Amino acid sequence: MHLTLPKWHDLHAHFRQGEIVPALIQDHLKMGCAGILAMPNTKPPVAKVFAADPLPCWSIEEYLAQLLSVGGEAFENMIVPLYLTQDTTPAMIEAGAKSGILKACKYYPPHGTTGSEHGRPFTTFIDNGVFAAMEATGVVLCVHGEEHGLPGEDYFSRSTNAEELFYRERMPRAADKFSKLKIVCEHVTTKVAADFVAKAGDNIAASVTPQHLIYTVGHLVQGLKYHLFCMPLVKFADDRDALRAAVISSGNRKFFAGTDSAPHAKKVTPCGCAAGCYTGGIAPQLYAEAFEMAGADFNATATQEAFKNFLCFNGPAFYGFAPSKETFTLTKTEQKVGKLKTPAGDIVPLPLGMKSDDAEGPVTMAWSIA
């Protein structure tokens, strides 16, 4: 089986900063990636648009320049969202949009994931004019959709969790009040979130990661596979089934690829475990495996078209740029996957991390890139 596809866009990925960045960019380029949306939860965060702005943080201008200088110029498209903080104002949104450099903003729930300590409650931006300015200027809102500050029994329980609460209580208010605001519900993990996106208007879409299509919380806790620990957490089989059904549908135009690939040279930390799964270099292969696990047959034209829509077309269409004219080839042949060597230390890709506690490799995947 050989699939020749347009090069795709990873519309949610982490490239961090410093000496690790060139290796991460090259890993993305080698898997047929034409463009990226690079997350702004760096240290310091990317929380202003212009370098000249008098705020003690990085700017989109500066972070883009860093990525471009170490290999990012090979991408056809690159978006760095503005991290929404207490310092974000409608005037900042308007000036950034007018300049053309501001394409998207990122909402993080306070302390909800790695580098999210600068986030503010979702209602802050509903009420202070920031979402209204984004709606008026066409800037996309990228949302980490989890309710923050919950007690443990509500954060993850049999009856609900932080993501379900957010999509039942917070997101509907924003969608109703800002009916033309373009929103990406990033890395959705639950049936509640998938159903919300499916029923919403064309201004609302969602990204889905490989891990949330392949694994459940049972895989995480059985043997404590900490390389699968990510935020939001993987959920239950019915949630995974809902995501699978959404992405393999022949009519899917609202769900697209966003890996949330997150490198950690040291996964175990003094305070627990760093959140994030590394899928750089192997994401199309993992997505193909996920489609097959969902019962899709790549010998069928309908499956090939659904996969192409999910991986290559839906995301660029939502963000407003053309799909790539370049191609890459995905083949049903085995591929060995080992650690990614970087100056900051070895990065363990997710399939290898799921193999054993010591994460020695390599491990064999069913698909490869020619």
Image: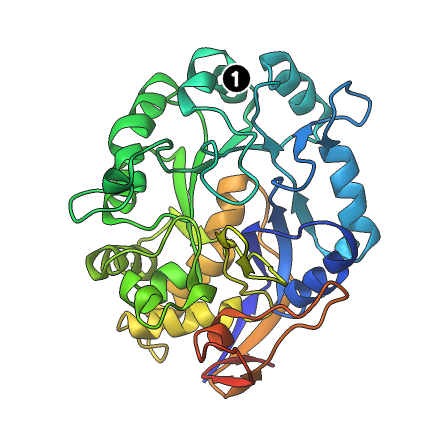
Q: Work out which residue is located at the far front of the displayed protein and give it.
A: 270
Residue beneath the point at 76% across and 49% down:
67
Q: Position of residue 358 (x, y in %)?
A: 51, 78
User: Toward the viewer: 216 or 204?
Assistant: 216
Q: Position of residue 342 (x, y in %)?
A: 73, 67
For residue 173, above or below residue 30: above
Counting every numbered tag in the picture gives: 1
On the rendered structure, is 203 left or right of 163?
Answer: right
Residue beneath the point at 59% across and 65% down:
280
Residue beneath the point at 43% across and 67% down:
287
For residue 107, above or below residue 191: above
SS category of the residue bearing label 1: helix
User: Toward the viewer: 115 or 198?
Assistant: 115
Residue beneath the point at 32% across and 68% down:
219
Q: Position of residue 8 (x, y in %)?
A: 56, 59
On the rendered structure, is 145 left or right of 38?
Answer: left
Crowding around mark 1 (Cα neighbors within 10 Å: few <14, some 14 to 19, many 20+) is many
Mark 1 — residue?
130
